[in-house]
Image: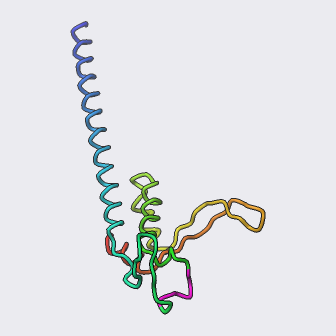
Amino acid sequence: MIEQLKKDTKVIQDAEKTIKATVKALRRNRLTIIRSLRNLILSLPDNPNIQRLSKNCFTMSSSCLSSRNWTPEYYDFKIQYRIICKEVMARQIEKMLPYLKKIIKEGFMSREEFIYAGHKGHKGTSRFYFHPDVIAQLKAIL
């Protein structure tokens, strides 16, 4: 009986070691996948219609402006890529790709945030629209 307990204990200890090693390998693989996806998105090309003056400053011809959106973030693809990475990376690994596909399909991302209206504020949902060329770049990598 005691011999059987010793054998069972050894089997359990071996199984625990195997499980710990597997979990460690899965975590390493998860980080590799996340870093690869992030690096891939951040390496996508910048807007060819802008001339960068510095990391956060650019100029562009007014003829390139869309009637839909005049915010600088709409034309700064690098900012849009960083926003996409931040939002996608905040999800569980199984939900990253579906969320990225949702962004590509809809062309925008909804965010819950505190919105000010006059002197009062309330929690609401806002939409951040992505430039069609950014969406096309994302489609190309999927």
Residue 96 versus residue 29 in the image, above or below = below
Say which residue appears at 28% left-offset and 48% top-offset.
29
Q: Is residue 29 left or right of residue 99?
A: left
Indicate the position of residue 72 as horizontal and vertical percent values. Answer: 52, 76
Foreground residue, 94 or 50? Answer: 50
Say which residue appears at 29% left-offset and 45% top-offset.
28
Residue found farthest to the right:
119
Foreground residue, 142 or 52? Answer: 52
Q: Main secondary structure of the magenta part?
A: loop
Foreground residue, 23 or 40? Answer: 40
Residue 121 versus residue 32 in the image, above or below = below
Residue found farthest to the front:
53
Residue 120 sits in quarter: bottom right
Indicate the position of residue 45 as horizontal and vertical percent values. Answer: 33, 75
Magenta part of the chain: 64-70
Look at the image and tell me in which quarter the N terminus lies: top left
Q: Is residue 104 left or right of residue 24?
A: right
Residue 94 sits in quarter: bottom left
Q: Is residue 11 left or right of residue 129?
A: left
Q: Is residue 136 magenta?
A: no
Say which residue appears at 26% left-offset and 41% top-offset.
25
Q: Is residue 66 magenta?
A: yes
Residue found farthest to the bottom:
63
